[in-house]
Amino acid sequence: MALIVVYDALPRIAGLTALQTRSKHQTRSVPQETIVRFSNRNLTGFTLSITLLAGSSIAMLAPSAHGAAVAQLQPESESPEQLELLRDFIHFVKIARFDVANDIGTRLLDSGLSSEGFVDLIEQSREQQRFEEAVAAGLRVPVLEPIAAQLESLFRDGKLSRARNPEEIARNIGLLTEGLRARSLARERLIFAGEYAMPQLLDAYLQQKDLALKAQVQRLLVDMGRHAIVPLITALPGLDATSQESIAEVLGLIPYRTSLPVLIDVYQSTNNNAVRQATGRAISRLGGNPGSDVAEMYALLANSYYSEPAELTSFPGEDHQLVWDFDPGLGLVMIPVRTPVFHEAMSMRMAQRALNLQPQNDETLALWVASNYSRDFDTPEGYENPLYGSDRRSADYYGIAVGPEIDQLVLRRGIDSRDTPLVRSSIEAIAQTAGSRMLWGQDVDGRYPLLEALDYQNRRVQFETALALGNAQPSESFAGSERVIPLLASAVKDASARYAIVLTGDDRESYDQYRVQLERQGFTVLPPAPEGLGQVEAAVAETPTIDLIVSAQGFDNTLLSIETARADGKMSVAPVLALMGPDDLIAMERQYGRDQTVSVRRQAISNSAFDNSVETLLEVASGGPISLDEADSYAMRSIEVLRNLAISNNQVLNISDAASMLIDVLQQVEGFTLLDIAEIISYMPQPKAQQAIMDAALESQAEIQIELLTIVSDSGKRFGNQLSNRQVRRLIELAGADDSALAEAAAATMGALEVDNDTLLELIFDGE
């Protein structure tokens, strides 16, 4: 039996990937979660291909049995004590002694049974129905819910593990030609195994020795529906003509349009008339057009995967999904990948195929870049992606390399999907590659995505957009230009402020509990709103953004609140922590399971778990709260941009638009930051600006005071004397100070302000 390691070499993207001369399949060392493939060609007369995942908890073993029958796997040995624990658990749940049931369930979990052994225990006890009823009841009881959930998960995992075992799959394939009951059970188990059975089912279907088996497998593949499609369309282009006809026939009978891009691709590229006819029939059955633009069809499928719909997720709730490769010599090869990056992998694959056919399609290239960014965001820490190795270029590299026009399309996608990490990454790429005019570029269907980002309700996005536009020193006015300077000023003032809404209906006690916890985390919590979000509309209008919404008001009211928030410009991207009771938890998870801005948790949650849930949600949805260090960075960067705009006297971005805000900041800062803000204000022609700097100078000491007087002097040189008489009097007093350096600075300031002699004499005589 030969051991062959297969890895996937993804196609190059529009000339961006460095040219590499590499075979599609090469032998490598086997890292964790790398594909390993075994072959056994002596089972039931047809070729059997099996894959396993090295180093993974879902590894599958190569079959050791040969011949027409495969022995039933021997069940794990269960002790009488485990059987008694199972029955006692069921009994005490039934009589509502949940405390006792919780203890017994814990002992059962600690008894050392594997998941498959637990399934054997339940089936041999003939208590499966009562067990399932007991678990369902336990999930509705807070004290028993954690144990009941673990038992349910162990049972489900055991059923899946057994169904997906290659030997079990082979045995069930052999039973497809047996009696009615055996065939019925085999079909049920193979359908339950889903895609994991496809390598062996494909071999069984393509063999020609047992036509009765071939017919049964065809019916089974059709009944498997969407779970059979991706493996079949992966294999289709690489098969011989006869096999292509057979696969096309099956695909035409499965009523899902997912297979259309590949069917149309093969239809248009084949030179075999029989294959063309078979694929044409399949396309017609599925309502497709054989003459469709193949590149566009692949791009549509890539876009569908990017949206992560349920119908393109084979194993919802599981840690891994399957990506498929096909080699004529090896057959189907399954590549388990972590679920968070599965849809991105498939979207990138389909987009790459579309780009191979139509390299100049900007929308498809933008989709690939967006998918690659998403892959980067969603990759679990420490995970080595078998489809995107650590030796490949980063997502940021490609984002910069494609240029600002493509990045505008990526940004538009991020704004429309409320994907804050994608929005931020595309803005960063645009800022690095675009000139002042190209920052907002040509309109995209009448839209200017970067300018729209000024109104995106996330302060990081707003700050970074304003910084990008400010750094560009624009010479032409644009929509939203009046917002840039105030945003930069607000970054200087307080970038780390956070605001939250807590919705608990009429339950004021719960509101106060969550409010205290959030205030401890640094949030300003808006007043209670027992009647819903409309009740805090005025308070919301006064905040920069809403950084978090906590809802603990049942399924219907939480659903209404989330949809109301999404329709409101100020709250459209606000992360939502939905705290649900046991009866509503699963329904809410199904509703928002793929929305990274919504986190669903049990309402009976500890304080520490609540804090962790908030932290995790904010990290995933918006990059986490703005830390003090990050706020300082935004402030320093904004000060630099404001200073440059002031010095250049930019007429599009007028720093005077932030006069009041910066004057307010001047009273709250000290040291070098105080001097930086004062310098910016000194370029504003308003009297209140010069007077604010002078007030700061009068309240300061030593070197800072001298520096501020110099800045007042600079303001006077630009705009003349705008000080009040009180301030001029104090300036004269400083000019007579014992400290010679201070006296000289004050005298120089008087000269720069050109205080007239009459005023000086009047002030001098008044002071005597």
Image: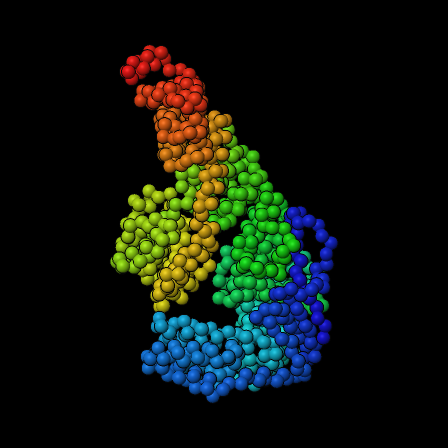
Toward which corner of the image does residue 504 lie, by quadrant?
A: bottom left
Left or right for 183, reference 603: right
Q: How many marks?
A: 0
- Farthest residue to the top: give it: 758
Whole-percent x and y of residue 162?
A: 55, 77
Left or right for 358, reference 758: right
Whole-percent x and y of residue 145?
A: 38, 72
User: Image point 57% across, 40% down: which residue?
Assistant: 432
Foreground residue, 266 or 29?
A: 29
Q: Report if residue 496 is visible in the image.
A: yes
Q: Report if residue 290 is visible in the image.
A: no
The image shows residue 677, relative to residue 231, as above or below, that is above
Left or right for 213, reference 442: right
- Farthest residue to the front: give it: 738
The image shows residue 611, relative to residue 60, as above or below, that is above
Whole-percent x and y of residue 758?
A: 33, 11
The image shows residue 53, relative to residue 684, as above or below, that is below
Toward which corner of the image does residue 212 lie, by quadrant?
A: bottom right
- Quadrant assignment for the N terminus: bottom right
Left or right for 360, reference 137: right
Toward which corner of the image does residue 631 lie, by quadrant?
A: top left
User: Image point 71% across, 50% down: which residue?
Assistant: 19
Foreground residue, 8 or 207?
A: 8
User: Image point 36% across, 24% down: which residue?
Assistant: 687
